[in-house]
Amino acid sequence: MIEVKDLCFSRTDGDSKHNILNQLNLSVPAAQHLALLGDSGSGKTTFLHILAGLLQADSGSVNVNNQELTQLNDKQLALYRRKIGLIFQQYQLLDCLTVKQNILFQHKLNYAGKAATEFDSLVDSLGLSQKLNALPHQLSGGEQQRVGIARALLNKPQIIFADEPTGNLDQTRSHQVVELLTKLCKAREINLVMVTHSQQLTDYFDQVKVLRDGLFD
Ligand SMILES: Nc1ncnc2c1ncn2[C@@H]1O[C@H](COP(=O)(O)OP(=O)(O)OP(=O)(O)O)[C@@H](O)[C@H]1O
């Protein structure tokens, strides 16, 4: 679950200070899915990075699964980030590694070589079984994003943050990827927060919020 109260975040550019998020409030119950919309520059990625423990709020409260992120030190934040899944618009796959190695990469770091029991069923449900020995550049955009989803899910995250995961995909592939992502997260009771520019993709979500002037509409 996510509980955000009176969250403020600003950036300083030379002498001027820009308020990006202004006393933002949000509540997402456990296992629910939130779609985050807003104009370019409205602060969606900034907000996602605060939820993911990559940026610190100036003030307010950010509570994720009963952890108050604003109270965590660097070491605790690093541990928190291990328990979340991140999915990016540019996929962020390592091109020198095969699909299989990419999917297993984070799991190996987090679970010190323990067997990834869910691997076979996950690659099967994401339609990647025939692509395990391919390199990322040999895949379509939709396939690359499914590798990104497999990598995030294999790690058994409590929560997934996805930043425009369909930004490089056509409409059909976007729907396929989001349908799969939301279905797999629901089955595992994972909270999902996804930034998107596409109103059409919000049908797959429990909650939709639009960021404008640092606040939700
Ligand atoms: N590293 C940075 N330094 C200074 N300003 C930044 C930095 N990153 C983002 N900003 C500014 O913060 C504001 C919010 O940016 P953010 O990337 O969160 O917007 P966004 O809603 O995700 O935009 P888009 O839809 O275009 O990705 C913008 O005005 C942006 O210029």
Image (tube, helix red, strand yellow):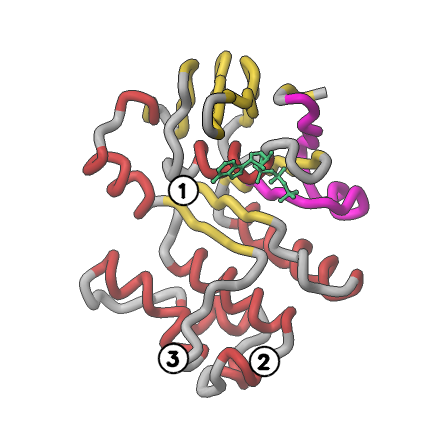
Q: Which of marks 1 and 3 precedes in the sequence?
A: 3
Q: Is residue 1 visible?
A: no
Determine the image quadrant of residue 66: top left
Disc 2 packing (10 Å; few <14; some 14–19; many ≥20): some
Q: Which of 131/162 is in front?
A: 162
Give the residue displayed 76% in from the left and 42% down from the top: 203
Amino acid at pointer 1: Gln
Q: Which of the labelled discs sits on residue 158, or is there none?
A: 1
Q: Looking at the image, is 214 positioned above or below residue 139?
A: above
Disc 3 beta carbon < 8 A from ligand 1? no
* Residue segment shown in magenta: 193-213
State the residue position of label 2.
139
Q: Earlier in the sequence, mark 2 or mark 1?
A: 2
Q: Nearer the viewer, mark 2 or mark 1?
A: 2
At label 2, which amino acid type do we have?
A: Leu
Mark 2 and mark 1: Cα distance apart in space: 28 Å
In the image, is residue 197 part of the stretch drawn in magenta?
A: yes
Ligand 1's quadrant: top right
Q: Is residue 118 left or right of residue 38?
A: left
The label nearer to you, 3 versus 1, is 3
Q: Residue at x 49, y 17 (%)?
A: 7
The vertical placement of 2 against 59, above or below, is: below
Residue hosting label 3: 97
Q: CA distance from mark 3 to mark 2?
A: 13 Å
Amino acid on which the number 3 mark rests in the picture: Leu
Callout 3 secondary element: loop
Q: Is residue 179 above or below residue 131?
A: above
